């Protein structure tokens, strides 16, 4: 039986919570580093997006790049090329990202077009993410005479992966032709969102219904926790019987994780109802209250010290003080647009996320917020970089304990004909002591400006539980 568990503040402190520092931690300014992108086919623009980093400076994300495949036409094989998104490692001093998926694991073109994404990297450099693969599954159905028959079908499935020096995937588990057993969880698809101490959190498509021949009929998204060492998975049931989706989105090295449960509208890609939780036990969750009672709350990250978790409450960025069990509003960059999301928090109380800036076209800017500074407001990161840098930052995904920030934006890139055009690129921000040059008379946005389109729009619209690229609900 699934149960709720209330964790008192003293017990949470025992999980590794300490008191926060009382100093203003916001850097004076940042250096912007272009993390580059993979080569692409012909004249298509390069694109990349940064999703995660650790305290050692390992950087991961995705990059659009060339994919070669063979097709047969009239008995003749020809090589075709397309641009697809690849899970990559970035390097601070090199604009050439490294593809994480081994060549021997190369998918078919139909799967490759759905992309591969590196969503997190652990303190010891283990990368996790997910990609689409083609897999043959067994089918069971009734024929015209009412008899059950076995068949097979090739389908595209999402698979979580982890790379700890060897590339591994979390394989689906399905009891072919057998009835569902409430004591045994069967699942077809998985996605990894975060990792700490060999513990992966994410989500899985858990099978909830089989047909009269015990063949797959329906599934539902459930939060997943996977132990690499034991190769075992556990799953999160909904907090309420009306909820249809759960997710685990962040975890720290003490094993404390965050996530949410709710009613998800698949057609509009939106949580109608959402309740966030914190726990270190998949069978005993601690629901939290957001900025108001019965608000729509999601949590995306918890810091390593276990002091704070961050997310969104009724479409406003907020942080949750675990020791006092209280939620605090972060606010918006522009009060005309009541939408912001907090995506990451470090052990110094610095929070990064995004906030809406315009509606037509829809655009966002990244913010940084200092929890420990009295009367703090979110600060647009674009105001903390040189105005003549050529960059327009769009989203900040994660901040580490050195204050480094990874994200994506548009940068002016000289084309073959000598003109400048905006390309969407992953960036790394590093704190510096000097003031940012904000003396430019005008700041002209590059072609794609601060708006999230192309690769940015892709990550704003896929998968509400993906810690590094959530649906902003």
Image (cartoon, rainbow, N blue to C red):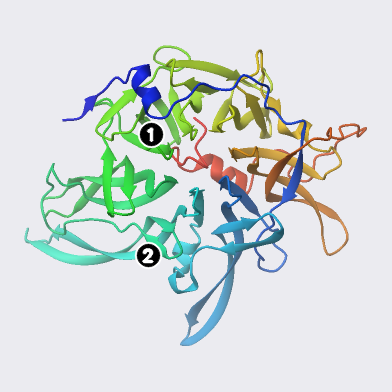
Q: What crowding class fits label 2: few (fewer than 14 Cα within 10 Å), some (14-19), or many (20 or more)? A: some
Answer with left or right where residue 305 lies relative to residue 220: right
Disc 2 element: strand
Disc 1 element: loop
C-alpha separation, residue under disc 1 versus residue under disc 2: 34 Å
Task: Say if residue 350 shows up in the picture.
Answer: yes
- Residue annotated with mark 1: 256
Q: Is residue 298 above or below residue 120?
A: above
Q: Horizontal and vertical percent for residue 331?
A: 61, 19
Front residue of this view, candidates 139 and 232 = 232
Q: Is residue 24 above or below residue 130?
A: above
Front residue of this view, candidates 453 and 387 = 387
Dividing the picture into quadrants, the one containing residue 324 is top left
Dividing the picture into quadrants, the one containing residue 285 is top left
- Residue annotated with mark 2: 134
Point out the residue furthest to the bottom here.
75
Q: Horizontal and vertical percent for residue 253?
A: 42, 40
């Amino acid at each position: 039986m699934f149960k709720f568990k209330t964790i008192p503040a003293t017990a949470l402190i025992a999980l590794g919570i300490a008191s926060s520092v009382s100093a203003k931690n916001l850097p004076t300014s940042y250096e912007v580093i272009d993390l580059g992108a993979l080569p692409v086919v012909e004249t298509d623009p390069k694109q990349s997006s940064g999703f995660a980093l650790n305290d050692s400076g390992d950087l991961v994300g995705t990059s659009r790049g060339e994919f070669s495949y063979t097709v047969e036409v009239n008995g003749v094989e020809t090589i075709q090329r397309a641009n697809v998104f690849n899970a990559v490692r970035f390097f601070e001093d090199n604009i050439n990202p490294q593809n994480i998926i081994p060549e021997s694991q190369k998918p078919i073109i139909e799967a490759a077009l759905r992309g591969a994404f590196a969503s997190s990297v652990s303190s010891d450099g283990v990368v996790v993410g997910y990609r689409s693969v083609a897999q043959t599954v067994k089918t069971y159905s009734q024929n015209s005479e009412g008899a059950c028959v076995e068949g097979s079908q090739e389908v595209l499935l999402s698979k979580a992966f982890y790379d700890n020096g060897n590339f591994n995937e979390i394989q689906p588990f399905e009891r072919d032709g057998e009835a569902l057993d409430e004591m045994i969880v069967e699942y077809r698809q998985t996605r990894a969102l975060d990792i700490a101490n060999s513990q992966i959190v994410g989500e899985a498509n858990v099978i909830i219904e089989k047909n009269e021949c015990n063949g797959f009929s329906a599934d539902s998204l459930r939060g997943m926790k996977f132990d690499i060492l034991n190769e075992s998975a556990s799953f999160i049931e909904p907090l309420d019987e009306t909820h249809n989706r759960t997710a685990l989105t962040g975890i720290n090295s003490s094993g404390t994780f965050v996530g949410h449960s709710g009613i998800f509208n698949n057609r509009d890609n939106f949580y109608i109802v959402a309740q966030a939780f914190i726990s270190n036990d998949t069978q005993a969750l601690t629901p939290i209250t957001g900025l108001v009672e019965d608000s729509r709350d999601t949590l995306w990250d918890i810091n390593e010290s276990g002091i704070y978790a961050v997310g969104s409450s009724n479409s406003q960025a907020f942080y949750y003080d675990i020791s006092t069990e209280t939620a605090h509003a972060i606010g918006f960059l522009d009060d005309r647009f009541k939408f912001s999301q907090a995506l990451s928090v470090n052990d110094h109380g610095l929070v990064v996320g995004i906030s809406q800036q315009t509606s037509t076209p829809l655009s966002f800017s990244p913010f940084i917020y200092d929890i420990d500074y009295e009367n703090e407001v979110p600060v647009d990161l674009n105001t903390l970089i040189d105005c003549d840098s050529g960059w327009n930052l769009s989203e900040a995904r994660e901040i580490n304990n050195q204050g480094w920030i990874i994200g994506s934006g548009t940068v002016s890139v000289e084309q073959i004909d000598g003109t400048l055009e905006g390309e969407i690129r992953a960036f790394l921000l590093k704190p510096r002591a000097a003031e940012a040059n904000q003396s430019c008379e005008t700041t002209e946005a590059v072609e794609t400006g601060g708006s999230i389109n192309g690769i940015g729009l892709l990550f704003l619209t896929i998968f509400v539980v993906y810690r590094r690229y959530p649906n902003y609900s």
